[in-house]
Image (cartoon, rainbow, N blue to C red):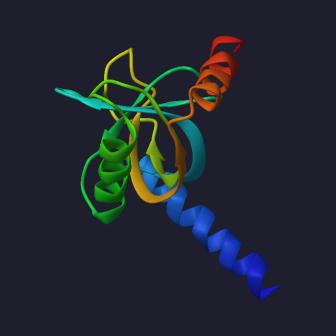
């Protein structure tokens, strides 16, 4: 019963925040292609093919940049990543972007061309 009450309270908080115009973040684990370069800091989920803009602040973002720099030959090369973070799909990034993603943890990554191609193929088939 206590769990049910706690769950109901959380739902009410989220609903009131949404109606008050505050951002509601959705916590997710994502597999996708990360690309970094001049004016580019994006994650394209394998499941959608539509890129998200990454919030570039915090230790997890630093870990991601370090992994990227040590794994790819040049900026704009793709890197397969598995990350945990929060998605704001309501963030106004224009029609092109899926939303704003704040990375909280870099779980895994790979520069293996086959792994990258499989992810990109999965997105293309959506």
What residue appears at the point 58 percent right and 44 percent down from the top-left corner? 30
Q: Quadrant of residue 5?
A: bottom right
Residue 99 visible here: yes
* Residue 82 position (above or below residue 98): below
* Residue 94 position (above or below residue 54): above
Name the residue at the left extreme: 38
Q: Position of residue 97 (x, y in %)?
A: 39, 23
Residue 125 vs residue 77, the one in the foreground: 77
Residue 31 vs residue 27, the one in the foreground: 31
Residue 7 vs residue 101, the one in the foreground: 101
What residue appears at the point 56 percent right and 20 percent down from the top-left corner? 49
Q: Position of residue 22 (x, y in %)?
A: 35, 51
Q: How many marks?
A: 0
Residue 22 visible here: no
Name the residue at the bottom extreme: 2
* Residue 93 position (above or below residue 59): above
What residue appears at the point 58 percent right and 28 percent down from the top-left corner? 116
Q: Position of residue 63 (x, y in %)?
A: 35, 58
What residue appears at the point 57 percent right and 26 percent down from the top-left corner? 113
Residue 117 vs residue 62, the one in the foreground: 117
Q: Where, quadrant-wise, is the C terminus in this rendering?
A: top right
Q: Where, quadrant-wise, is the N terminus in this rendering?
A: bottom right
Q: Position of residue 24 (x, y in %)?
A: 45, 51
Q: Quadrant of residue 120?
A: top right
């Amino acid at each position: 019963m206590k769990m049910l009450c706690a769950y109901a309270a959380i739902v009410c908080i989220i609903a009131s925040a949404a109606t008050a115009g505050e951002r509601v973040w959705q916590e997710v684990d994502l597999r996708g292609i990360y690309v970094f370069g001049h004016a580019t800091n994006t994650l394209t989920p394998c499941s959608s093919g539509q890129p998200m803009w990454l919030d570039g602040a915090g230790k997890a973002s630093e870990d991601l940049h370090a992994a990227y720099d040590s794994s790819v030959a040049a900026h704009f090369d793709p890197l397969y990543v598995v990350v945990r973070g929060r998605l704001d799909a309501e963030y106004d990034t224009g029609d092109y972007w899926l939303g704003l993603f704040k990375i909280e943890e870099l779980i895994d990554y790979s520069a293996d061309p086959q792994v990258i191609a499989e992810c990109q193929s999965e997105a293309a088939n959506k």
